Image: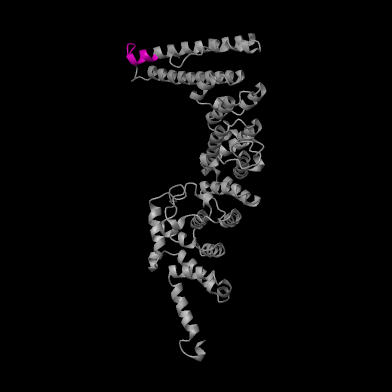
Amino acid sequence: MTEDYGEANLVEQTETFLNEIFSNWPDSIKALETCEEVQPFAEDLHIVSRCIDSLAMKACSDPNLFNWPVAARNCKQNQEDDHALWNGISRDTRLSQSDDWWFYDVSLLSLPFYKRLIIAIEAKGMKSEAVAASLIYYLRRFLPLMNRQSSFTDTGHATIPNTSEADQRALLEEIVELIPNKRGVTSSKNLLRLLRTAMILSASPSCRENLERRVGAQLDQAALVDLLIPNMGYSMETLYDIDCIQRILDHFMSIYQPASVAASPCIIEQGALMAGADALTPMTMVANLLDGYLAEVASDTNMSLAKFLALAIAIPDYARPLDDGIYHAIDVYLKIHPWLTDSEREQLCRLMNCQKLSLEASTHAAQNERLPLRVIVQVLFFEQLRLRTSISGWFFVSDNLDNGHHHSGNVVLPNNDPCQRDTAEGNENLRERLLELEKECSSIRNELQKLTKTKKSWSILPKRFGFRKKSES
């Protein structure tokens, strides 16, 4: 069948035909799909490897540059996807149409051929983001759990209904291993959805650990709603999987908090602040995210105090510029768990720093009956101290301005000038207010010395503190 026995013999005709097939994308896809039926023979003749090399080369190139005809079904789907959400969110802005035009066609391949093609595409220099997006696209076609917010409208994109749970689990574990291990190539939303699917399908511990580690590496990019993973355990102790989030936090802290200085929070704070905001930004974002998560899980009556405390202290105190978020979570927990003892409430309130509460949070805390009395007194003390410091600083600036007016020859104001008169009146009012605050503080100290430890005695403190409605103050 070679040319030795005649011109244009079968081998030459077959080679010419295959070269024509490999010259365009749709025919190469069809040829590779056909090889699945006769795979042993196609492997021996190297047709499979040649198809994969041809497809990988074309996927890494712009089809418009070479006028390659792309399958009509793919063009139609791309047009529909342009007007829809991709994977429950808007299309990835990092990927243009020239990057993802091949996703649908390769998703029609069986898993063995698809894996070989993806490996070849990645080896030829395809961007990691495009490789990861194709893997997620392939998973969504076979795993119904990945399409909770699916935007697929074409029947060709519907999930395969007859796939067994065991096959779905095996597919998930295979695809997770292929996702490039690089921060940011896959969104945290997709990683958390993969993790949730892995838990439902009872994937291997190594697969779940791999996903938890990836999520932990980019936890600062996650959203609160994606962290609310339902508890899949047999005990169903809590509504959400707290242990999973704890492990993810531990992975995050192992990256952003060096072990060599983990035992010295003060040193970390000074060093991180001197180094700049870059190191603190991810941790601050995670601290805000964690505070929101704690407020959500605090409403679960089965949420134990030990787990709540363990989550809260996972992020160091210096990562929180304000403690309003952790205060809100503590308040929700105290409201839902009124049976806590006094010592447990004291332990819970040690999570927040009263000096880092905003004015609004301090006002709320000062009137919060669920807080221990010691915390309320601390809030009032620091609020008074803050006010006194502000007034003292204002007096210092005002005195300097007055001295400057009197000693500068060209800007002396007359005694009857209304600006100077208003400034003097303002100074007198602030001094009177400061004296009143000092008297109130002295009165509080005297009353605290006289009060007994009974709850009935504490009930008169709000009146002594002078709490009033906001409209009256």
Could you tell me how many numbered marks the image carries?
A: 0
Q: Pinpoint residue 334: horizontal percent, then vertical percent.
A: 59, 25
> On the picture, is 5 further left or further right than 310?
left
Quadrant placement of the C terminus = top left
Looking at this rendering, what residue extends furthest in the front direction?
162
77 above or below 288? below
Inspect the magenta stretch and tell me whether residue 415 lies in it. yes
Residue at 55% x, 53% y is 182
Provide the residue span drawn in magenta.
Answer: 413-423
Q: Nearer the viewer, residue 66 or 88?
A: 88
Residue nearer the viewer, 418 or 54: 54
Which residue is at the front of the view, 12 or 131? 12
Q: Looking at the image, which residue is at 45% across and 73% down? A: 21
Can residue 277 be seen here? The reply is no
Check if residue 337 falls in the magenta segment.
no
Q: Nearer the viewer, residue 312 or 432?
A: 312
Compared to 402, does 225 lie above or below?
below
Q: Quadrant of residue 173?
A: bottom right
Asked whether, in this view, residue 17 is left or right of residue 275, the answer is left
Horizontal and vertical percent position of residue 247: 63, 42
